[in-house]
Amino acid sequence: MGDYEPADGDDEDGRLLVIAARDPEAFGALYDRNYTRVLAYFYRRTYCPHAAADLTAETFAQAWQQRCRYDSERGTGRAWIFGIAGNLFKQWLRQGVVRTKARRDLSIATPPITDDDLARIDDLVDSFELRTALQSALHTLSAPARDAVLLRVGLDLPYEQVAALCGCSVGTARVRVSRAMHTLTEALEVNL
């Protein structure tokens, strides 16, 4: 991290964001400090390493693009980053896909996930506890909602295929998945 060692009691992430407006290396230090936290945040909510990696990459791409808009009077740097992450997660819940605009604008590709990466991601969270909570939360959904979310999120099927398998319109499939994901997220928040 070089010149970007944390000062005790400071909002180090906020300081790095301010410096990053003129020095890209500071953003690298910010990324190193927060990457694992952001990845764990998404993994705990999606339980999908690929979605978590894509959402994490998009979070930092957007943070890079918006770094000059950070205002320390409105909160800490880490809270600002997690604000971006939270917005991306909500969009993912509604749309069922990870936004890629910031990564495309910056020509950033999300690196493929290796077996070592999967093991590292799995170590970030207590998988057994999360799996148990997810199983319980899934049982609270209606059968049509549970089927739709398992097909779309669990099997990564396109909405057209989810609709065909569920015997409903594409719009109805989208609504079922969105509502189910919202319900699941609320149920799991207690365990996250």
Image: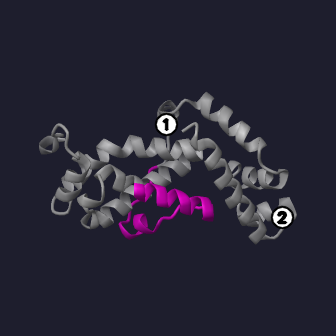
> Does the magenta run of residues contain 48?
no
Q: Position of residue 13 (x, y in %)?
A: 26, 49
On the image, numbered disc 2 is attached to which residue?
164
User: Which residue is at a point 87% across and 64% down the rendered structure image?
Assistant: 167
- Horizontally, residue 132 falls left or right of residue 64, namely right
Q: Position of residue 105 (x, y in %)?
A: 38, 70
> Does the magenta run of residues contain 96?
yes
Main secondary structure found in the magenta portion = helix
Q: Position of residue 17 (x, y in %)?
A: 23, 56
Whether pointer 1 and pointer 2 mark residues with C-beta atoms closer than 8 Å, the reply is no
Amino acid beneath label 2: Ala
Extent of the magenta region: 83-111
Mark count: 2
- Horizontally, residue 10 falls left or right of residue 44, namely left
User: Which residue is at a point 32% across and 66% down the rendered structure image?
Assistant: 65
Task: Please tell me how crowded label 2 is: few (under 14), some (14-19), or many (20+) other residues with Cα within 10 Å.
Answer: few
User: Which residue is at a point 84% across and 59% down the rendered structure image?
Assistant: 165
- In primary-sequence order, the first of circles 1 and 2 is 1
Foreground residue, 107 or 143? 143
SS under mark 1: helix
Q: Does residue 145 sit above or below 175 in this rendering?
A: above
Amino acid beneath label 1: Ile
Q: Position of residue 51 (x, y in %)?
A: 55, 51
User: Which residue is at a point 19% across and 44% down the rendered structure image?
Assistant: 10
On the image, numbered disc 1 is attached to which residue?
121
